[in-house]
Image (spheres, rainbow, N blue to C red):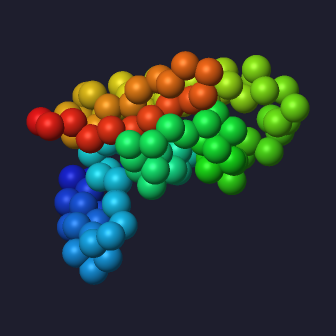
Amino acid sequence: MCARCEELQEEVRQLRALLKPSAFDVPLSWKLSASQREMFLALYGRRGKDCSVEFLFQASRKHGWDHVRMDRIEDVGSLVSVYIHHIRTKLRIAGAPFVISTVRSIGFRLDETNA
């Protein structure tokens, strides 16, 4: 994608955010995949609250995870953990004002940082 196209996409994103201020529009600069974006938005919608692995799995399931069975919870947990790892890395690189914490025996929690 050319630089001008990326600028225009970012401008459209910002204008959409102005039209619906209650929603969060993930910046393109974070470079999240579609399923990573859906998982982040699921966390964002419940920011400050614990989110179970099952909840995050269901939030991202529409992006090709239908082959993963919920009765194999260890597989689901591993899959979600890998995605969270990638999201954390991309947020840190982009300097995003969020941190994802692991909540032992439950799942994950998104919090806003003070920076």
Residue drawn where x is 14% and y is 37% of the image: 114
Quarter-of-image position of residue 83? top right
- Residue depicted at x 62% and y 50%: 59
Horizontal relation, residue 73 to residue 27: left or right? right
Q: Nearer the viewer, residue 7 or 38?
A: 38
Q: In this view, does 7 lie above or below 44?
A: below
Position in image of residue 71 (x %, y %) = 87, 32
The answer to whether 92 is drawn above or below residue 46 in the figure is above
In this rendered view, identify the residue nearer to me: 83 or 29. Answer: 83
Across and down, in percent, residue 80 comes to: 61, 30
Dividing the image into 4 quarters, which one contains the C terminus?
Answer: top left
Q: Position of residue 30 (x, y in %)?
A: 31, 42
> Going 76% across and 23% down the picture, which residue do you hit?
75
Q: Is residue 21 visible?
A: yes
Compared with 103, 6 (above or below) is below
Near-viewer residue (61 or 4): 61
For this view, does 97 lie left or right of residue 105? left
| Residue shown at the point (24%, 61%) measured from the top left | 10
- Please, which residue is most extreme toward the left here? 115
Decide if residue 63 is in sight here: no
Quarter-of-image position of residue 86: top left
